[in-house]
Amino acid sequence: MASENASLAVHLLEDALDRRSTRKNKTQREGAECCAAGLLPEDFGIFDTPPETLAEEKAALEKEIEELVGMAKGKVFFDSIRAKVLHCHCVWVN
């Protein structure tokens, strides 16, 4: 399990480095100086998204999952993950 986690971390970091490189190249092409030498949240795909947009995206995703045909086991898996996330969120917030 540890090696799988390490592999995932390496993959996420490599993707973030690729995004940072793309961001820096775009900034330089536009003639502006790149102000952030390090990694930014958006390099990892993390953005400040308004709650309304998140709710819309969540509803669309849940609808897409519900409409999957022949995915009973997958839906059970998603339900178990959802329950864990909701439980963790409640424990963390309270």
Image (cartoon, helix red, strand yellow):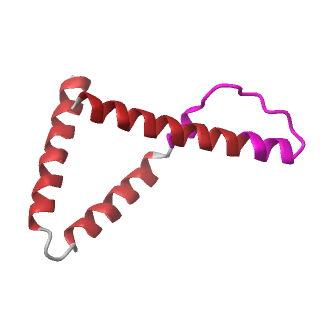
Residue 61: which quarter of the image? Answer: bottom left
Q: Which residue is drawn at 24% across and 24% down?
A: 92
Q: Which residue is drawn at 20% across and 31% down?
A: 88
Expressed as whole percent of the image width and height from the top left, the position of residue 4 reads: 28, 36
Q: In this view, does 70 lie to the left or right of 38?
A: left
In the rendered image of this protein, does residue 47 appear above or below residue 73?
above
| Residue 48 appears in the figure | no
> Predominant secondary structure in magenta?
loop
Q: Residue at x 36, y 36 (%)?
A: 7
- The foreground one among 79 and 90 is 79
Q: Is residue 38 left or right of residue 47?
A: right
Expressed as whole percent of the image width and height from the top left, the position of residue 77 reads: 13, 53
| Residue 54 appears in the figure | yes
Confirm whether the magenta stretch covers residue 30: yes
What span is colored magenta in the figure?
Answer: 24-48
In the rendered image of this protein, does residue 12 appear above or below residue 56?
above
Q: Is residue 25 left or right of residue 31?
A: left
- The foreground one among 63 and 8 is 8
Q: In which quarter of the image is the C terminus?
A: top left
Expressed as whole percent of the image width and height from the top left, the position of residue 31 reads: 90, 43
Confirm whether the magenta stretch covers residue 33: yes
